[in-house]
Amino acid sequence: MTKVALIDDHSLIRNALGELISRFDDYEVTHQASNGKEFISSLDMDNLPDVALVDINMPVMDGFKTAEALSKEYPSIKIMALSVEDEEESIIKMLRCGAKGYLLKDSDTQDLRLALDELSAKGYYHSDLVANTLLSSLNGNKKATKVSQIHYQAREFEFLQMACSELTYKEIADRMCISPRTVDGYRENLFYKLDVKSRVGMVLFAIKNGIVEV
């Protein structure tokens, strides 16, 4: 059972979310708080939540400071921002403070469930909103340069470039005349070398470092 914490100063929203999440299989809401300070002071090392849904705008201790404190003091708790704000600055800042996902409060129930599932299973949730925000931010950075310290095999580099297209992994295997298992090997090697955890991470790395252009 995945334990979820809700940190939001609006009790109506908090209670509604609690009732909704409690209806999801394998999830239970174990903590609720109206701000970050209240939440952190209530934590017990023997009963920590697995996931914390954190609002950004809260009194006493806002979402940014809460995420930063949790990342340092309780790194096992996966943080997801849940906010009405969709500004690039807020999204980037929240991710830098330690959030592993970002979801708008007007999202559908199925999007909330997907976000919780991916956050629990993978440790992060890259929504289209987050991906597009990061791409926009990186495209605005004209000072990006290639990372020469990383040593690619020739075919790994070819795979990385193809991974930045709309091709599926199976289609990439066909184009490269290799087996899907070999593609899996290239992918896992690049995840390790680039220190990323997903295809989105590979694409963002390639764009940031001038390997591909958009």
Image (cartoon, rainbow, N blue to C red):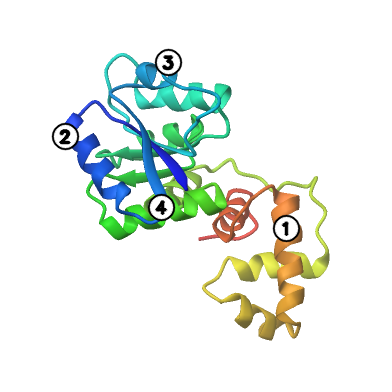
Circle number at residue 115: 4
Please name the residue that numbered disc 2 is placed on. Answer: 12
Q: CA distance from mark 1 to mark 3?
A: 40 Å
> Of circles 1 and 3, which is in front?
3
Q: Amino acid at mark 3?
A: Ser
Q: Amino acid at mark 2?
A: Leu
Circle 4 SS class: helix
Please name the residue that numbered disc 3 is placed on. Answer: 41
User: What is the x, y in percent for residue 69?
Assistant: 49, 21
Counting residues from the start of the chain, the first of labels 4 and 2 encountered is 2
Circle 2 SS class: helix
Residue density around tag 1, few if under 14, some if 14–19, many if 20 or more, within 10 Å? many
Q: CA distance from mark 3 to mark 2?
A: 22 Å
Please name the residue that numbered disc 1 is placed on. Answer: 190
Q: CA distance from mark 1 to mark 4?
A: 25 Å
Q: CA distance from mark 4 to mark 2?
A: 21 Å
Q: Amino acid at mark 1?
A: Leu
Q: CA distance from mark 2 to mark 1?
A: 45 Å
> Of circles 4 and 2, which is in front?
2
Counting residues from the start of the chain, the first of labels 3 and 2 encountered is 2
Circle 3 SS class: helix
Circle number at residue 120: none
Residue density around tag 3, few if under 14, some if 14–19, many if 20 or more, within 10 Å? few
Q: Is residue 45 left or right of residue 10?
A: right
